[in-house]
Amino acid sequence: MPARDIYHDVVKKALIKDDWIITHDPLSLKWGKKDMYVDLGAKQLLAAERAERKIAVEIKSFTGLSEMSDLEKAIGQYVIYHDVLSQVEPDRELYLAVSEEVASGLFEEPIGELLLRNNRVCLVVFNPDMEVIVKWIP
């Protein structure tokens, strides 16, 4: 299994505070002979609809030497996980978890805005100090 992101426990606590139940840590995926691990799987009961919402969350800290290199790797990983999830668990939504700093920096820049506008990625934005979710960007 891959190493955990530095914000793994922060995001897990933030999701729990936001009424999510962590169902997988990590969420294991298999496609052909390839194994993959999304950082977290979670579900939330929607009382009004008497339904259940399921998500998978890949956590990225963007602490590498190159922000663009981190972005390319994160988006590539996101696309692979998204496509596999669409086949093996089509009712589970995939989110990329990033800190407020990354969201307000990278995803408010033209390159990040383009990715969001073209529906390349869904974000869950968290505050690492308060360990809370501050925004969902579907």
Image (cartoon, rainbow, N blue to C red):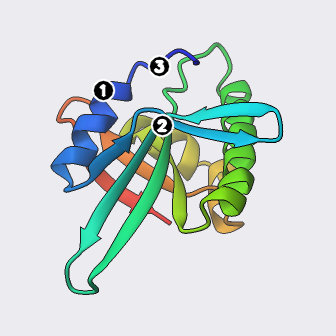
Q: Name the residue under label 1.
A: 9
Residue 41 vs 99, above or below: the answer is below
Tell me the residue at 41%/36% (across/down).
Answer: 101
Crowd around label 1: few <14 · some 14–19 · many ≥20 (10 Å): few
**Picture quadrant of residue 19:** bottom left
Closer to us: 32 or 39:
32
Label 1 or label 3, whichever comes before in sequence order: 3
Q: Name the residue under label 2.
A: 102
| Camera-nearest label, 1 or 2 | 1
Label 1 or label 2, whichever comes before in sequence order: 1
Q: Position of residue 6 (x, y in %)?
A: 41, 18
Closer to us: 98 or 33:
33
Q: Is mark 2 on a helix, strand or loop?
A: helix
Instruction: Name the mark on residue 4.
Output: 3
Q: Give the amino acid type for the residue marked by disc 1 in the picture.
A: Asp
Residue 6 vs 96, above or below: the answer is above
**Disc 1 from disc 3: Cα separation:** 9 Å
Closer to us: 98 or 52:
52
Q: Where is residue 96 in the image (x, y as percent from the top left)?
A: 52, 46
Label 3 or label 2, whichever comes before in sequence order: 3
Instruction: Name the mark on residue 69.
Output: none
Q: Is residue 120 visible?
A: no
Crowd around label 3: few <14 · some 14–19 · many ≥20 (10 Å): few
Q: Give the amino acid type for the residue marked by disc 3 in the picture.
A: Arg
Q: Is mark 3 on a helix, strand or loop?
A: loop
**Disc 1 from disc 2: Cα separation:** 18 Å
Q: Position of residue 112 (x, y in %)?
A: 63, 50
Residue that sits furthest to the right in the current view: 32
Tell me the residue at 42%/61% (across/down).
Answer: 54
Q: Where is residue 121 in the image (x, y as percent from the top left)?
A: 62, 55
